[in-house]
Amino acid sequence: MTGAPAKFGSMLGLAPGEVPAFSSHYASADTREYPDRESYRSYHEGIFMGYKWQCVEFARRWLYRNKGYIFDEVGMAYDIFQLRCVRVIRDNTLLPVHAFRNGSIRRPEPGSLLIWDEGGEFEHTGHVAVITEVFPDRVRIVEQNVDHRPWPRGRNYSRELGAVIDAAGGYHITCTYDRGAILGWVIQTSDPSHAEPRIEPAPELFNLRLAEIPSQRPQGAWLDAARPDEAAFIAVGRPWLTNAPDLQRSYFCLSETAFTEIKHAANELHAMFMHATHKVLKDDRLLARFKLPRSIWPKLRQSWNNRRNQMITGRFDFSVSSRGIKVYEYNADSASCYLETARLQGTWFDSFGFEDGDCPGNRLYPDLARAWRKSGVDTVLHILQDNEPEETYHALFMKAAVEEAGIRCKLVVGMEGLDWDAAGFVVDRDGERILRVWKTWAWETALDQLRAEFDEEEALSAISDSHPRTKRPRLADILLRNEVVVYEPLWTLIPSNKAILPVLCEMFPGHPNLLEARYELEPEMARYGYVAKPIAGRCGANISMVDRHQEVMQETGGTFGGQDHIYQQLFPLPRINRLNLQIGAFTVDGKFSAACVRADTSPVITSDSDLLPLRVFEDEDLLPIQN
């Protein structure tokens, strides 16, 4: 196809079943027609299909129009290759689907989904198209978000891809992009012949293993005091990743299968949390559960509509064991452990000359730098942190990633030295306005400042365009000012609040990665044990774990005891020796990036828990030898 890209939203062609395909040339989107994020959500007959006009949205819409079913939420297009079923909209029944590797003896059929792997032309996301015709030497496909140009007149497909049949009868579809790869096709069928085998991974592959570096000393100092973030880590008094003498040569082993499943779970859960956030922000009754000042509700919704894709990073807290992968919560507002995950666990192994396995954190730093390049920050970014030693090395690590992206960055510790300028903007010690912010502070800290002085109807009005010069700026005066762009955005208050967990359970009943959660303690949950969590608590504070005998197993202190609580199914962390283990799975730009393991003798992981080195090994290296 030749010519200029069609304007965003223009119809490119009509696929079989009278399904239109639209241009997704975002650069030409009319902001009057698409003023906010909500306007980019695509619905057909009241059913959410995806975001205009992406490849997944078209695949869902085509299947619904032609088959009456859709596939449920996926993290990335390539995750469709892992699907097990589709859902009939009429009655919510599930139909089986099977994946066939490119080169399979079973050829695709009209209505099959053709899946590209991540990387190359489809970096990070992969791609999906619908196959509409199959020939011995080619297939015809329909799709969105590849070429934004109209299809030739009279043609009902977007592209033809060549195909060859090998000597064994395998059908190979040719990818037209040098840096792309076709995984295969997905067919709705109950016949698994020639499909990708669905052998469930051995449960023991999900169990962490404790190992120890041979008795030797590191080859020189393993921490680099010349790096500001590592120097700050040393200053905290942690020359090792743990201060426990008997664990200073210990590390944990994770199988490649478990690591892959953690990646898929994080991608899918991020999308699920985003859908739940949307549901909450559309429903005043649900939003009231989150106990946020009503005066900021419009600002929350505006943040979601305008900045849905501007979340830089977050961290899921997982239990990973032979019992499966379960999520406890999503730290989408402010997380920690970046330095330890991205660099220190890797350099710890390097210092011993240990080369086996792979580091699960080595993508985090480059992914963060890439996300910051995409952020559009075009002025100085101020990093705001509390005056806490541990927050200093978190902040300095992020500062390095921001500067790697070519963005000028300044660190602000505490609120001392900040002032107002003549126009009522908060300025730093150099008199420079604070307009772009990444913070280690939680949004709730700023809201607490308002709650302490105003009732919830007046809270936001306290942030006005001018302030008495005699009054020192508060955190809220920066973060809630309209002219200030904050990372993570205000809407991350919703997925970070534990009140979202019952919403997820209602939206995705029986999902294998979710633990049952309720707003009220129900007899059935009490019968099997539960965990009471403050809705906006952090760092494991004010949590009560109660067993099936109604005996308190563990109770933590903190400053969140006066909050409303949710009740989550009791699902204790896996334990090795005396250590309880929790996997942290980092997302960057909405996609899985890295993993770490936190360890504690307490069953509740807190900010004081150790982060011990984690390494990923091939499955056969971790499975017990079979006799």
Image (cartoon, rainbow, N blue to C red):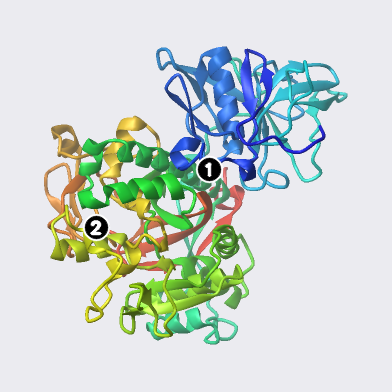
Above or below residue 273? Residue 614 is: below
Mark 2 or mark 1: which is in front?
Answer: 1
* Between 317 and 563, the one nearer to me in the picture: 563
* Between 254 and 55, the one nearer to me in the picture: 55
Mark 1: few/some/many CA within 10 Å (<14, 14-19, 20+): few
Q: Position of residue 606 (x, y in %)?
A: 30, 64
Residue 31's label in the rendered image is 1
- Residue displayed at 77% across by 15% down: 154
Q: Distance between the residues labelled 2 and 1?
A: 27 Å
Assign the N terminus to one quadrant of the image. Answer: top right
Asked whether, in this view, residue 363 is left or right of residue 160, the answer is left
> In the rendered structure, which amino acid carries the disc numbered 2?
Leu
- Residue displayed at 47% across by 78% down: 410
Q: Where is residue 55 in the image (x, y as percent from the top left)?
A: 61, 33
Q: Is mark 2 on a helix, strand or loop?
A: helix
Q: Is residue 22 visible?
A: yes
